[in-house]
Image (cartoon, grey):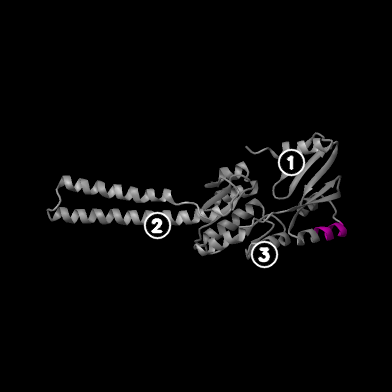
Amino acid sequence: MRTPYWKSNSFICKREKIDLFDTEEFSMVVGKGVISKIQDKRILCGNEKLMSEEGVNISEEVNSVISELRGQGKAIVITAIQGSVIGIIAFSDIIKENANSMIDKLLKSGISDTILLTGDNKKADEYIGNKVCIKEIKSSLLPEDKVSEIVNIQNIGQLICMVGDGVNDAPALKTATVGVAMGTIGSDIAIEAADIAIMGDDISKIGYIKRLSNATLKTIKFNIIAAMAINIVAIILSAMGLLNPVTGAIVHNVGSVLVVLNAALLYDRKYIQ
């Protein structure tokens, strides 16, 4: 069971003897940040769009620091109190060691292209994209923008597999042809919206899912052709008088058993990185 985020942070604050105050008001602006009121002070945490909408002025010095941090591939959260910027929180995504090999295997398995859809800033996204060899990057996207990008691709006849783990990914996961959520690190709403939940944070399993999907489609096509072939042969033999109703029924059942046994071989597809 995952420990709720607010509980783990509450424990840290108590351990470090940091005072916690009750929030009098709280609202979330999707894709931009949060607004709260604590001790009669209006507090903002979010991106430049939120600050601009709320009339917060960002100085050249702060902008310079933000640009420098984003050049390092960090996501930025600006914090302001009573209309004045008091700090910057920088987050850095941890790129998994097998991310490059996973994308390479996906491309070799028949995937035409990989696209990074994210709400982060363009500089940070390009840094991450270059690290994992993703050339097409769509930055600063709101949840509805991600859905629009997927719909546009689907409208030209392409099938989309969306992989995500956050609340903002949920609409896109639901819209995509196939949605895959990371079960361990993903939010509950993302897991609920997805078609497939990977029980763990091993992204190499995405390649395994693709290989298993390919094998499943091949098995289905083979079984359909095999069943039709057996039935056609049985009809011809019956017309020639070589099969009577009893032997015809046996041939039909044998064909069904063979199809089921062939499908059961999918259970023996072991996970290999």
Amino acid found under the numbered disc labelled 2: Lys
The quarter of the image holding the N terminus is: top right
Residue 18 at x, y percent in the picture: 84, 37
The residue to which callout 2 is attached is 218
Q: Position of residue 267 (x, y in %)?
A: 42, 48
Q: 50 left or right of 142?
A: right
As for residue 193 lying within the magenta part, the answer is no
Dot 3 lies on which element? helix
Pointer 1: residues within 10 angstroms few (<14), some, or many (20+)? few
Image spot of residue 36 (x, y percent): 79, 40
In the image, 99: left or right of 33? left
Q: Distance between the residues labelled 3 and 1?
A: 35 Å
Which is nearer the eye, 72 or 23? 72
Q: Give the range drawn in magenta.
A: 59-66
The answer to whether mark 2 and mark 3 are in CB contact below 8 A is no
Q: What residue type is labelled 1?
A: Ser
| Circle 3 residues within 10 Å: few <14, some 14–19, many ≥20 | few
Q: Mark 1 points at which residue?
A: 27
| Residue drawn 78% across the image and 37% down it | 25
**SS at circle 2:** helix
Where residue 231 sits in the image (x, y, percent)? 24, 53
* 2 or 1: tag closer to the N-terminus: 1
Q: Is residue 128 above or below residue 165?
A: below
- Find residue 134 and name its label: none
Examine the rendered structure and indicate whether residue 101 appears above or below residue 30: below
Going from N to C along the chain, the mark reached first, 3 or 1, is 1
- Tell me what residue is drawn at x 34 percent, y 48 percent: 261
The residue that disc 3 covers is 130
Residue neighbourhood size for the residue with mark 2, other residues' Cα within 10 Å, grouped as few (<14), some (14–19), many (≥20): few
Q: Distance between the residues labelled 2 and 1?
A: 50 Å
User: Between residues 225 and 178, which one lies in front from this camera angle?
Assistant: 225
